[in-house]
Image: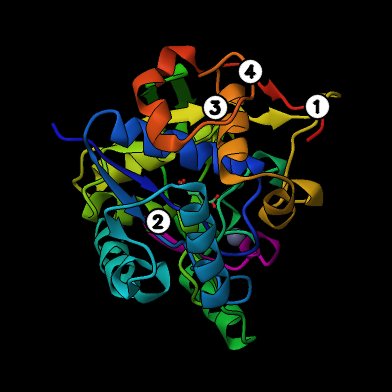
Amino acid sequence: MAVRGRFAPSPSGRMHLGNLLAALLAWLDVRSQGGTMVLRIEDLDPQRCSLDKAKQLAEDLQWLGLDWDEGGLEPAYCQSNRSHYYQEAFHRLESMGLIYPCYCTRAQRLAASAPHASDGAVVYNRRCAHLTPAQRQELEAEGRRPAYRVRVPHREVTVTDGHMGPYTQQLDADCGDFIVRRSDGVWAYQLAVVVDDALMGVNHVVRGCDLLSSSPAQAWLHRTLGYEPPRFYHLPLLVDAQGRRLSKRDRDLDMGVLREKYTPQELVGLLAWLAGLQDTPKSATPAGLIPRFQWAKVPKNPIVFGSP
Ligand code: GLU
Ligand code: ZN
């Protein structure tokens, strides 16, 4: 089957080294197999995302030499324009009896963004699954607007990651009922990513390891909605010399600073070296790396990046 891969960044800020590594490897995974690359803009959260940031993101990818065949800033590939698809999937889950309102307040905040490990996700205790209709009415009368959760089954789901190997979760105990729509009406990442990967025909998902723990729930949601889950390839995280995860908070690793420090070839060479595709951080181009790309060369343990 022809490979259809995607890069699905959130335009909530400038990309950083970790995003770039995922983008380069997603691109190489597709290009080395003659596949199709989709760029999808995950701009669900209107508070954090903007078109300007999305434009910057697309321009940063082009600067690096990473192109795409479909999507980008086209409205049909921006999640903010795709509510009708999420609504339709939501209705289907609802008609299966899998959706319930959750009035807990704390839970809603991060649901629209991908649950990166550093967010410290907790398994929901199903408190609101047991509310009676009368209790719900009471909460509504107080003016409380619920988020909506999907009820996951008591089921073990194993995802065979193309890079990391088998990964298993007991859905109810390890993941819990997750939010598909926030109380302010914003669709949650977990629903949107599944619906979009399915409708866009994506069959290879390359991304950072912090989303590995979301992949069993996503695979389950794909099947529940009648879709075949994609093959997942999760990359190790980038860490500093002390083993701490490099993140958006490390400002010196954001694309604005990186572009002042490196040429595109130098930066691609550095990423290729971190990814195990060359022995030194010597300059490289994405196209030049295609013949050298193999998942077997990419490390599985966290990649240590000392200082730029
Ligand atoms: N949009 C997500 C992020 O920026 C990535 C989603 C994914 O690759 O599944 O972290
Ligand atoms: Zn609740």
Magenta stretch contains residue 110: no
Of the two numbered discs 4 and 2 in the rendering, the one whose residue sits closer to the viewer: 4
Name the disc covering residue 280, or none: 4
Give whichever of discs 1 and 2 has the lower sequence position: 2
Q: Which residue is mark 1?
A: 306
- Element on which disc 4 rests: loop
In the image, residue 1 above or below residue 257: above
- Which residues, given as a range, are shown in magenta? 97-109
Mark 2 residue type? Leu
Position of residue 253 measured from the top left corner of the image (x, y, whole percent): 74, 46
Q: Quadrant of residue 144?
A: bottom right
Dots 1, 3 in contact, CB < 8 A = no
Q: CA distance from mark 4 to mark 3?
A: 9 Å
Of the two numbered discs 4 and 1 in the rendering, the one whose residue sits closer to the viewer: 4
Q: Do we see residue 179 in this rendering?
A: no
Position of residue 304 measured from the top left corner of the image (x, y, whole percent): 73, 23
Give the farthest residue toward the right. 242
Of the two numbered discs 1 and 2 in the rendering, the one whose residue sits closer to the viewer: 1
Q: CA distance from mark 1 to mark 2?
A: 36 Å
Position of residue 120 measured from the top left corner of the image (x, y, whole percent): 71, 43
Q: Quadrant of the C terminus?
A: top right
Name the disc covering residue 191, or none: 2
Crowd around label 4: few <14 · some 14–19 · many ≥20 (10 Å): few
Name the disc covering residue 272, or none: 3
In the image, residue 188 above or below residue 35: below
Crowd around label 1: few <14 · some 14–19 · many ≥20 (10 Å): few
**With 139 as the anchor, is 158 left or right in this view?**
left
